[in-house]
Amino acid sequence: MEPIFIDQSAFDSSLYQREGHPWLGSTLKVDTIIRVLKESKDTYILFTDIDIIVKPGIYDRLKIYMGSDISMVFLKEGEHLNIGYMLLKVCPDVLAFWELVRAKVIDDPSVLDQRYVLDLAAEFPGRYTTFDNQEFACTNTWLGKTPFLVMQILSSCLGKEYDFPEKIFHTAQNMDVQAYMKYVPEYVVPFIYKYQELLMRSHKEAKTAFRS
């Protein structure tokens, strides 16, 4: 596998075009998946569009799915198939699946692409599965009882100005980020503290409501 990166400018012009989730109405993700599936000479692609923490040992876990009859492996977020981190087999069935997802997004952009994936998965002719949700975890599903290999840092969609700060805050709960803070724009830092204040306020309100 060889990495393929998308320039940040592509995200700047594609995301936050609608109210709600930043990806609503965007085909950037599915367009990239389709393009790579068509052009790749590899047997598999590992796709991620998210802020993640990755630990050593991940490849050994991915190899379990390679060479099997499983064509797509997703993150499991509750009852959802999370498409922020996926192992995809390069084959006609997988390509056709993502082309169908793209057609759905274009037909009704008010629905998140991830929702279409969940709806259409039942019709997929091949096999798909999910990673173990504690080894390959999301911040809202990891129980903290076993080590994770991959952690997806989710945002609460509080607004564009809070998205990145929130992810930095939660990343810092799971690893030392101090060495990386020099890459964070100065205007982002105050929002990290503002997010922390929102979190504390929400916690206090929840405790008050529980006691009453």
Image: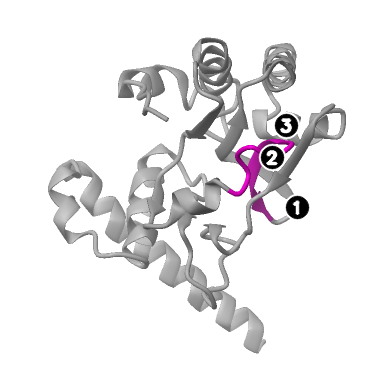
Of circles 2 and 1, which is in front? Answer: 2
Q: In this rendering, would 61 be left or right of 107?
A: left
Inspect the magenta stretch and tell me whether residue 185 lies in it.
no
Residue drawn at 17 percent across, 60 percent down: 178
Q: Position of residue 3 (x, y in %)?
A: 36, 28
The residue under label 3 is which amino acid type? Val
Q: Which mark is residue 68?
A: 2
Residue drawn at 29 percent across, 56 percent down: 192
> Residue at label 1?
79
Q: Which mark is residue 117?
A: 3
- Please identify the quarter of the rendering in which residue 43 is found: top right
Q: In this rendering, would 172 be left or right of 185?
A: right
Q: Secondary structure at mark 2?
A: loop
- State how far apart marks 3 and 1 are (Cα): 13 Å
The residue under label 2 is which amino acid type? Ser
Q: Position of residue 182 (x, y in %)?
A: 12, 48
| Chain-order first, disc 2 or disc 1 | 2
Does the residue at mark 2 contact the one at mark 3 (Cβ under 8 Å)? no
Residue in front for this viewpoint, 211 or 106:
106
Residue in front for this viewpoint, 57 or 28:
57
The residue under label 1 is which amino acid type? Glu
Quadrant where the C terminus sits is: bottom right
Q: Residues within 10 Å of mark 2 (few under 14, many from 20)?
A: few
Stretch of the chain drawn in magenta: 64-77
Q: Secondary structure at mark 3?
A: helix
Q: In this rendering, would 7 be left or right of 96?
A: left
